[in-house]
Image (spheres, coloured by chain):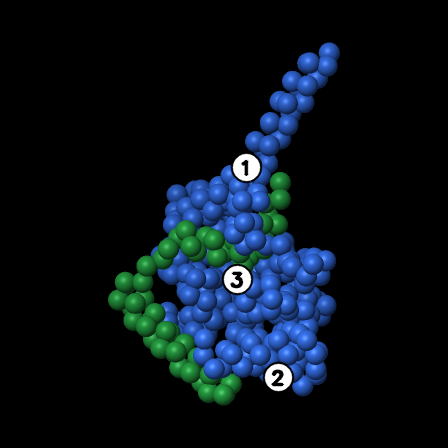
Chain colours: A blue, B green
Amino acid sequence: MTLAHVLLNDTWMDFVATRRAVLRDELITHYTPLVRFVVGRLGIPSTPVLDSEDLVSFGIIGLINAVDRFDPTRGVRFEAFATARIRGAVIDQLRSLNWLPRSAVARVKQVETALSTLEQRLGRPAREDEAAQELGMTLERYRQTLMEVGLSMLSLEAPLSMFGQDDELLTLRDLLEDQATLSPDDAMEKKEMLVILRSAIEHLPEREQVLLSLYYVEEMTMKEISKIMEVSESRICQLHTQALVRLRTIFAEWGDERSRKKLKTTVSSTRRSNKVAS
Amino acid sequence: MIKRKTRTAQQSRLARVEELKAQVRAGTYRVDSTLLARRILENESHFMENNKG
């Protein structure tokens, strides 16, 4: 452990014991770069009315919330604990400004349907020009739509208010990392989800696979990915959205199929029960 | 101390960006689809919402 780690650890322990404002400020200052990092990964384009500094200030609300609630004795890294809160705070603020209207969700559906229809017809992932044509748009308009869809997809994210009573947001991460507590059915379902998603990833165009890996595995920001892949940041946001929409489509089809199977099983077992009863 | 730590972190991040750029350019960057699937499910809660049957 380095001296910096020891000092930080001491600051946390002092803060938890005393709740002194000066220590709180020190921690908030120390973790401010984390807010910039998380906001940078959201890929929200700046506009004349809302720039990146506004987004950072929204994120700071999440950071303060995280500093106030973090318990270092629980063995969770602060960065992991705070990231969900920072992200959630930005999304909540955008929602409150009506930046992520629910009506925009319909646009996600349109693009999902177009990509899904084309993939079934062509037997391969659709190119952008093909998707644009299917939607009756120019390529430029399609790319602009992808940017809007990216924001709309954020609106589908779990709101910050979903943090539970014990201050933890239950995510698939929790489920995946604690397989022992899952029922055999749930464990099987989670395993199936991973297999389906992995297979869907492998069917994506290679460039989109690399982009997603840089974002989710290497944890690069949109700006860094644009440097690595040598295209503009807005182009990276568009391609990221397009890849996610493709995956959501495949995943949704699997979800529908699973629901149908569940319904079939329920109907069969109800029929069996009714037979026994009569 | 904290400033120095931040500067070092920025430098190592820049180096990582350059390293990844070289791998992507050379076509040697490998995607681990299993790990990527896990990370997407951990980060994109709307994938879960989409499948609440």
Mark 2, residues whose alpha carbon is within 10 Å: few (<14), some, or many (≥20)?
some
Choose the circle earlier in sequence order: 2 or 3.
2
Look at discs 2 and 3 and give the one toward the viewer: 2
What residue does disc 1 label? A184
Residue shown at the point (46%, 62%) measured from the top left: A216
Q: Can residue A108 be seen by looking at this rendering?
A: no
Chain of the residue on which disc 1 is drawn: A
Q: Secondary structure beneath disc 2?
A: helix
Residues under labels 1 and 2: Cα distance?
46 Å
Q: Are marks 1 and 3 on the same chain?
A: yes
- Amino acid carrying label 2: it is Glu
The image's mark for residue A146 is 3
Task: Using the rendered view, name the quadrant where residue A163 is placed.
Answer: bottom right
Q: Residues within 10 Å of mark 1 (few under 14, many from 20)?
A: few
Q: Nearer the viewer, residue A203 or A110?
A: A203
* Front residue (pair A12, A43): A12
**Which residue is the site of mark 2?**
A26
Q: Considering only vertical position in the picture, is B28 above or below A198?
A: below
The image shows residue A140 at horizontal and vertical percentages of 48, 65
3D distance between C-alphas at marks 2 and 3: 40 Å
SS class, disc 1: helix
| Chain ID of residue with mark 2 | A
Residue A188 at what x, y percent from top left?
Answer: 51, 39
Residue B43, how many percent across, how many down?
Answer: 54, 59
Name which of mark 1 and mark 2 comes first in the sequence.
Answer: 2
Residue at 48%, 51% in the rendered image: A247
| Picture quadrant where residue B46 is located | bottom right
